[in-house]
Structure formats: structure tokens, C-alpha cells
């Protein structure tokens, strides 16, 4: 791999190497630019992806470490935040794409014009995106083709228009998918094969999925999961113009002359501070770490944080909203092997005024537990927590359980935010990340509505038993969005429609923070697409001497 | 300090000077080890505590027609965990076991240890502590030891996975 001297001025520094950073690095390097990618996490390889639930799930090997990077949490701005885990994300080269479930359906047209179609929601800041689905469509197609997505075009009657079919056919249907499909059709609903960023066939030198029982939460040692790590990162490196610097934690994006940034200051793996200078900087650190970094990057020009003349950096924080219903069957399903999701439906995707609240979402069928977390968290509440009854339940339920998961909207609320904790520091002496968050009442209503729809579907499957957990406000979340909102008006947004920061010529931000509305959870496909589109603009701007 | 705690060093020192105690400790090791089919040496749990932890784990996931926590070697998982990634939980085990022993003495005067109680007495004991933080930790460790990768010391012969029908 090429090694670029730290004293060189490169064309682009990209901060973060996940769903957005990986794509941006690859596009820029392919277009001929010299790129340094700064990634706080380690550069892992296939041999690191052990089939070990304790290491990966209980110890969070692929995630941020709350001991070294504490979070604080409070519900409202009038409270003092308490130290506790609040956000989680994948922390390694490739980011969350290394270990995610790999659901990659496209946003619908409605997602980009929620405000126009619905109106205002009291207590929320619903807005249209400055782009429309049609602007992003070519890039969704690029995501599917370049990363490798399995699916069936035309199978979802609610899908937005598409220029090309999926490059790969759907993955095999599982017992949970078959049961769900039959039940949903009985109710007149329209289940379709789930689009997944997992190869159903060999593709671009990578093999097809081997249907192992270690998918969500684990790295794929086979390289069948189409993560940034397996796809765009090596492609970026092959250009000979891109260096991935892992274990490098950026603490500040540094201003240069006038309205330009000049580079990024980071701690290298030995803890030494390094300044990497660049003609332009792209921040792709995820919807929580990106605003945190900008807020830490104060200067005379930006006393409230870099890019923050609107005061909106960190605000409108939207999160991972989902709810499930579980079912037990007489016959074993053995659904624990293979890709978790094989069927989805979008019949409840749109908001409907008749419901009396804003919001909607999709429903999928899955089994996404592993032995330990199943025993600890999946069983119905009335099953004994220990003893013969507990042991019997483990033996009976594990092979015979499936669940429906609904993924839904999350409203942008100005008082929901990511900010710097005034007291708590991380292991590098930097301010800890503080989450201020209360679920909007409509978000909870959507979750309850969709949970009932899940139960309704399960009730016609012939399940022996159906159970749910009550919908409650939550305090711990992945899927981090909204905190550097896109928009045309510099007073109401942080980046413009091309992901360039309004008040800084050569600074771009693209990742979950760009989202104006949340979509319906599972944002990775749209993050990838936004990154491809943003990179197009960066390349053009650089070639035209604008940066 | 290395993994040998000060307490363990004292134990060894005392054991070497008092053959009777050493003998008893060795029997305790073997007693636990022989039930699981492998002689065990404990790195963090004192031998008499290991016997009690194993008894409690066996109430959580009992032996019977199918292997339980005992056969899976859960106590070896716990011991190894307390020597490595959960070494900060050792104190919780020390104080937790003291609490359970005190409760045992209250409920069953004349009893000497948990392992020696009848099965229904052990269940009554667990009922009386099931809402404590220590029991929560013990249950978590028992489940991890029963269903985690065998390399961690438990789930011997993959008996935990076999119970739930999980094949890699």
C-alpha cells in the first residue's frame, strides 16, 4: 500500500472509512487525487473475524469502547447528563458496514419531501431534503452494482423507480421468510425478497455467502458481506493514490486562511499528534462523531465549532427506531443459519393521516439471535429465569422461534442532539460525547402501530405462541442521523445540496449526519448513495479549481 | 500484581505448610473435576468457592436427561473469566458468595455449604437471592459458560449448543 509522507499536502483528507468514507476515498482516488483516510479504529482482516459471540457481541470487539470513549446521556437540556452508554457504531476500517445486518432497500420518493407531503408536525422540525429521489437514483444503482447487492427488481410494488435491476438474484428464502410471506399474502400484503448487501453468487472475485450462523454483529471472513472493507477500500488502495491510516484519531479539523480548512490534526497509533495538510477535507465520521469533531474544531472564525454558524451542528439527532414481535412454532425452523432477513414488506411505509400521527415503516421476518443473547433476552417474560423450566425453554424455543422486525420513522427534533459533555473526558482528554434525546410521541405511536401489524401477521401463521415487549423510550442507539443537516438555506442547515459546508469552501460532510429526515431506519444504502453523489461533486469542484 | 492475587499466594503458602488443608483442597479440586470428567486447576476461585459456584450454576441450568452447567464445565468458564476479561468482578464474587452463605445459614441452620444441600433446598436458596445483583452476575456467567465457545472453558463438547440445536 502507498505510504504518503505526513508533511506532504495531499488533495483530500477523508475522516472515517465506513459507509461514506470508503466510497468517497475510492471515488476520489480513482479520479486521480491523492487521498489520506484517517480512521480511528483498527484495520482488521478476514482472520480477525472470529465466530465468537463472547468476543464480538458481549465484548463489542467491532464497536466503540465505552471505557475509553465514554458517553453521557440526558433526556432534556435542563438536566445534567449522566455517564452511561448512549451510542454505538462499528469502529474499524469499514465502519459499521463490516458487521451490519446488511439490509439495503432504497428510500422512497416520499422520504425526500416529507414536509411538502405531510405538513408540519408539532414539536418536530420536519423538512424536505434539498435533493429528490431522482437526484440520488443513479447513485443507488451504483451502490448496488459496485458493492454487490442481491435482490429482485419489480418484486416490491412500493419501490421507487429504478434504472437497472439488481446485479445479483435474491438470497435463498428462509423458514421465517416463507412463513411471513404466506401470512402476509393472506392479509393482502406484498412481501418481497429483501435487498441485502450480501452476495448470493460469486461476484467481483468474492464468493457467495456460505450461510453460516454468524452474520449480524460479526465480520465476514468469506468477504460475502459487501462491506466497505471488502469492496471500496481495497479498490481505493489499488489506485496507488490512497493511504488508509488506521488507529488515527482526529481531534480537530484545522482552519487555514480565510474560509478554507487546511488539514486535520490527529493522534497516531502511538499517541503522537500529527497534522496532515490537504487541499480539502471530507468528514465521514458518522452521525455522532462527525458533529462532535466539528464542535471540537473551534477557531476564531468559528467560536461555536467549525461549520456551525447556523448553530445546528449536532442538532436534529435522529436514531434507530424499530420494534419486534416474536413467535414460537410447533415444528423446528432452525432459522439461525444464514443471512438474517429474506423477506420484507413496505405496505405500511407511507404516513397516513387516518392513523392520527406522522410516520410509517417496513416489516421484515428474521431470526437474528445467537446462543447467549437468545438465552438472555429472547424468551417470553413468563419463562423462568433459571432452573429446569429455563433449560427446557432454551431447548424448545431456540430452534422454533422467529421474529418480525418493524423499522420506522424517527422525527427530527431540535432539542435532540449530540454535543460535547462539559465535564467528562475520554481517554485522550477530549470532551465526551453527550446525547440529549427524548422520543417524539409520534415515533412511539408508529412503533406501537407497527408492532400491532406484526402481531396481526403472526396471528395467521399458525404460531403456537406470540409475544412482545412494550414499546418504551430508549436511551441507547445505533443508526446515527441528522446532525449536519443538508439544505439550501445556510441559516437552517449545515451543508448544501452537494455536501459542501455552507461557510467553508473546501470542507465536505457526508454520512448519516447529512440526513434531513430519517427514512425508515436502516440508513446504510442511502449513506452509500449520498457518498457516491457527494464524491462526484467533490471531483468536479476540484477539477474546476473551486477548492 | 500478576494474576496470582495476594490471597492466592497466601493460600498456596498455607497449603504447603499444612498438608491437611492441601489434601482437602486437592480433593475439592478433584471432586469438581471428576464430575466433569477433567481434573481442574482453578486460577482465581478458591477451591471451596468453586464447589459452591458450581452448585449454584447447576441450579440455574440443572443436569438431568441432558447435560447441564456441571457437565458443560461452567465453573471453569467462570474461573477463567475471573482470571482474564472479568478480573474486576472477583470482588463481586467474594462478597456475593459471602452474602449467599449467610442466607444459607439463615434458611438452613446446620447446613455447612451449598453443595451439600438437597436440590429443593438449593432452589429455595436461589429463590431468596434471585433479585440480587450477584445472582444476576452469576446467571450471566452461567449462560455465557454454557453457550459460549468451548475455548473459554465452558460448553464442553459443545453440550450447550447441542441442547439448543445450534451447529456451527
Image (spheres, coloured by chain):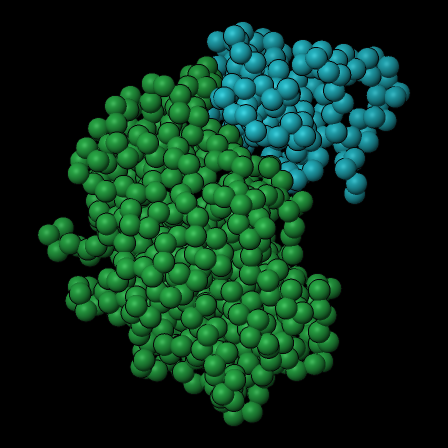
Give the quadrant of residue A220: top right
| Residue located farthest toward the right when viewing the structure as drawn | B17
| Residue located farthest toward the bottom when viewing the structure as drawn | A258
Q: Residue at x 49, y 88 (%)?
A: A544
Q: Residue at x 34, y 34 (%)?
A: A177
Closest to the observer: A13 or A467? A13
A543 vs B37, left or right, is left
Q: Residue at x 56, y 68 (%)?
A: A25
B77 vs A378, left or right, is right
| Quarter of the image that includes the N terminus of chain A | bottom right
Give the quadrant of residue A304: bottom left
In the figure, A273 relative to B6: above or below?
A: below
Q: Judging from the image, what is the letter of the chain drawn in green?
A: A
Q: Judging from the image, what is the letter of the chain drawn in cyan?
A: B
Closest to the observer: A421 or A117? A117
Closest to the observer: A426 or A227? A227
The answer to whether residue B49 is visible is no
Q: Residue A490 appears at what percent x and percent y? A: 35, 82
| Residue located farthest toward the left when viewing the structure as drawn | A354
For the image, the number of numbered tags is: 0
Q: Residue A360 appears at what percent x and percent y? A: 23, 52
Q: Residue A399 appears at what percent x and percent y? A: 43, 24
Q: Residue A14 appears at what percent x and percent y? A: 56, 71
In the figure, A228 relative to A211: above or below?
A: below
Give the quadrant of residue B115: top right
A36 vs A87, left or right, is right
Q: Residue at x 30, y 66 (%)?
A: A133
In the figure, A85 relative to A213: above or below?
A: below
Amino acid at each position: 500500500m502507498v505510504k504518503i509522507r505526513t508533511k506532504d499536502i495531499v488533495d483530500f483528507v477523508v475522516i472515517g472509512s465506513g459507509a461514506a468514507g470508503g466510497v468517497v476515498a475510492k471515488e476520489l482516488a480513482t479520479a486521480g487525487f491523492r487521498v489520506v483516510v484517517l480512521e480511528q479504529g483498527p484495520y482488521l482482516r478476514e482472520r480477525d473475524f472470529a465466530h465468537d459471540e463472547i468476543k464480538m457481541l458481549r465484548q463489542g470487539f467491532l464497536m466503540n469502547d465505552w471505557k475509553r470513549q465514554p458517553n453521557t446521556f440526558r433526556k432534556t437540556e435542563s438536566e445534567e447528563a449522566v455517564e452511561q452508554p448512549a451510542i454505538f457504531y462499528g469502529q474499524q476500517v469499514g465502519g459499521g458496514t463490516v458487521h451490519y445486518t446488511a439490509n439495503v432497500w432504497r428510500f422512497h420518493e416520499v422520504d425526500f419531501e416529507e414536509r411538502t407531503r405531510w405538513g408540519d408536525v408539532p414539536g418536530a422540525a420536519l423538512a424536505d431534503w434539498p435533493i429528490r429521489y431522482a437526484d440520488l437514483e443513479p447513485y443507488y444503482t451504483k451502490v448496488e452494482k459496485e458493492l454487490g447487492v442481491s435482490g429482485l427488481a419489480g418484486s416490491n410494488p412500493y419501490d421507487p423507480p429504478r434504472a437497472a435491476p439488481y446485479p445479483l438474484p435474491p438470497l435463498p428464502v428462509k423458514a421465517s421468510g416463507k412463513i411471513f410471506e404466506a401470512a402476509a399474502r393472506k392479509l393482502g400484503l406484498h412481501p418481497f425478497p429483501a435487498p441485502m448487501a450480501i452476495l448470493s453468487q460469486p461476484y467481483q472475485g468474492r464468493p457467495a455467502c456460505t450461510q453460516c450462523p454468524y452474520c449480524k454483529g460479526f465480520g465476514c471472513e468469506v468477504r460475502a458481506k459487501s462491506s466497505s472493507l471488502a469492496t471500496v477500500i481495497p479498490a481505493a488502495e489499488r489506485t496507488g493514490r490512497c493511504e488508509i491510516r488506521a488507529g488515527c484519531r482526529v481531534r480537530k479539523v484545522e482552519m487555514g486562511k480565510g474560509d478554507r480548512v487546511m488539514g486535520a490534526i490527529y493522534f497516531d497509533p502511538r499517541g503522537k499528534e500529527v497534522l496532515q495538510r490537504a487541499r480539502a477535507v471530507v468528514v465521514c465520521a458518522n452521525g455522532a462523531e462527525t458533529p462532535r469533531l466539528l464542535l471540537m474544531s473551534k477557531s476564531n472564525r468559528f467560536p461555536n465549532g467549525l461549520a456551525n454558524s447556523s448553530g445546528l451542528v449536532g442538532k436534529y439527532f435522529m436514531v434507530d427506531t424499530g420494534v419486534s414481535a416474536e413467535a414460537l412454532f410447533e415444528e423446528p425452523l432452525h432459522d439461525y443459519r444464514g443471512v438474517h432477513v429474506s423477506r420484507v414488506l413496505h405496505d405500511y411505509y407511507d404516513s397516513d393521516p387516518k392513523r392520527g400521527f406522522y410516520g410509517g415503516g417496513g416489516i421484515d421476518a428474521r431470526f437474528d439471535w445467537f446462543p447467549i443473547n437468545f438465552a438472555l433476552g429472547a424468551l417470553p417474560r413468563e419463562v423462568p429465569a433459571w432452573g429446569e423450566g429455563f433449560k427446557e425453554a432454551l431447548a424448545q424455543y431456540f430452534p422454533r422461534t422467529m421474529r418480525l422486525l418493524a423499522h420506522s420513522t424517527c422525527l427530527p427534533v431540535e432539542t435532540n442532539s449530540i454535543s460535547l459533555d462539559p465535564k467528562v473526558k475520554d481517554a485522550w482528554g477530549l470532551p465526551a460525547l453527550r446525547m440529549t434525546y427524548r422520543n417524539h410521541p409520534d415515533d412511539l405511536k408508529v412503533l406501537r402501530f407497527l408492532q400491532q401489524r406484526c402481531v396481526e401477521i403472526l396471528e395467521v401463521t399458525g404460531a403456537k405462541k406470540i409475544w412482545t415487549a412494550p414499546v418504551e423510550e430508549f436511551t441507547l442507539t445505533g443508526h446515527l442521523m441528522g446532525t449536519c443537516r443538508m439544505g439550501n438555506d445556510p441559516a437552517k442547515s449545515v451543508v448544501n445540496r452537494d455536501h459542501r459546508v455552507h461557510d467553508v469552501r473546501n470542507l465536505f460532510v457526508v454520512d448519516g449526519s447529512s440526513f434531513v429526515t430519517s427514512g425508515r431506519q436502516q440508513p446504510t444504502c442511502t449513506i452509500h448513495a449520498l457518498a457516491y453523489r457527494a464524491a462526484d461533486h467533490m471531483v468536479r469542484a476540484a477539477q474546476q479549481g473551486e477548492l | 500484581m500478576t494474576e496470582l492475587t495476594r490471597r492466592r499466594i497466601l493460600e498456596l503458602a498455607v497449603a504447603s505448610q499444612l498438608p491437611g488443608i492441601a489434601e482437602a483442597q486437592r480433593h475439592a479440586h478433584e471432586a469438581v473435576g471428576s464430575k466433569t470428567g477433567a481434573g481442574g486447576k482453578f486460577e482465581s476461585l478458591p477451591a471451596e468457592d468453586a464447589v459452591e459456584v458450581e452448585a449454584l450454576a447447576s441450579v440455574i441450568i440443572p443436569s438431568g436427561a441432558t447435560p447441564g452447567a456441571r457437565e458443560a464445565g461452567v465453573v471453569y468458564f467462570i474461573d477463567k473469566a475471573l482470571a482474564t476479561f472479568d478480573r474486576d468482578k472477583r470482588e463481586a464474587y467474594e462478597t456475593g458468595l459471602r452474602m449467599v452463605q449467610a442466607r444459607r445459614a439463615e434458611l438452613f441452620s446446620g447446613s455447612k455449604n451449598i453443595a451439600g444441600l438437597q436440590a429443593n433446598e438449593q432452589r429455595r436458596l436461589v429463590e431468596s437471592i434471585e433479585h440480587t445483583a450477584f445472582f444476576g452476575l452469576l446467571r450471566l456467567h452461567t449462560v455465557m459458560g454454557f453457550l459460549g465457545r468451548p475455548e473459554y472453558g465452558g460448553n464442553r463438547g459443545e453440550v450447550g449448543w447441542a441442547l439448543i440445536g445450534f451447529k456451527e
